[in-house]
Image (cartoon, helix red, strand yellow):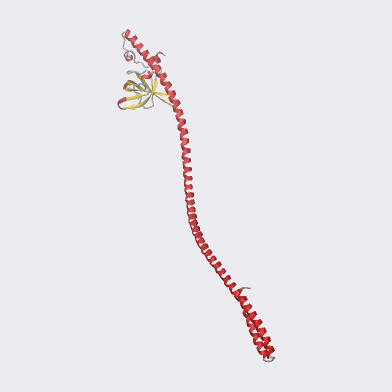
Amino acid sequence: MNLIGRMFIVLIFIMSIMFMSFSVVIYATHTDWKKRSEETSAKLKESETHKKQLADARDNMIREFNEELSRRRAVIADLETKVEELSKENKRYQDELTQLNEEKEKGIASVKLSHESMQSLRAEVDGLRKDLRKAQEEWARLNTELVAKTDEAHELALQLTNYRSVGEKLLQDYRDAVDVLKKHGLKPQPELYTGIPPKGIQGLVTEVRPKGWVEISIGEDSGLVRGHELDVVRNIDGRSSYIGKIKVERTEADRAAATIIPEFRRGTVQRGDSVEFINTAELTAR
């Protein structure tokens, strides 16, 4: 039972005493006044004593009520303070939550951007891998080609060394031959002594020029000199046709220029015709 209920009980008790007193007064009118008066006085004293006890109890209850009220107010004030602190803390948490949500959104955007960048980088890496693979294949091809060229260069170097040795020997032979010719009073000019080309010489017509000039694929290295006469033959399907005769006018190491001799012309000289020496003297002897 709370304090207010106790106060109502006290008030009801006091009202009951008052009604009881009225009843006693009414009853006294019908009984002995002295006896009733004594009894009433005794009861009144008892009632006053009880009333005083009730008043003391009421004062105690009021004091307790006030003390309890003060305690409740203090508790309420403390609770209000705590509520205010909790409100502030809640607001702080709300701000932090808002900030965390913003950071989360930024993080999601950053992750999405990173994912897109990763996709782009992955595509770029795939392209670079393809380029690298092509470059490796090209490098392997070039390396193979380099090895082949290196081998070819070594082979050409060996051939050059051999050619130089042969050239030095031929030069020495030429010098020895010139010395021998000089000792016998002869000039080192073969065209002064013979117009017959080397036996078995053979080449091709490489170009046909205006005014009866032609170029052939053999020269000084094959033994040709100015004044040699060669025969032009065309080979078609295993059959040979005589075209005419040419006379060497200029020579180089691997080619020569000649003119067509008109009186021996049997056809038109063309590029690709064979050039050789046909020894008519040997044919007649046979």
**Residue displayed at 47% across by 36% down:** 136
Q: Is residue 118 left or right of residue 39?
A: left
Q: Quadrant of residue 261?
A: top left
| Residue 98, image x, y percentages | 49, 58
235 or 159: nearer the eye? 159
214 or 219: nearer the eye? 219
Q: Is residue 141 left or right of residue 50?
A: left
Above or below, 134 against 150 in this view is: below
Q: Is residue 219 left or right of residue 68?
A: left
Above or below, 58 against 157 in this view is: below
Residue furthest out toward the top: 184
In what quadrant of the picture does the C terminus appear? top left
Q: Quadrant of residue 30?
A: bottom right
| Residue 246, image x, y percentages | 34, 21
| Residue 155, image x, y percentages | 44, 23
| Residue 159, image x, y percentages | 42, 21
Residue furthest out toward the left: 211
In what quadrant of the picture does the N terminus appear? bottom right
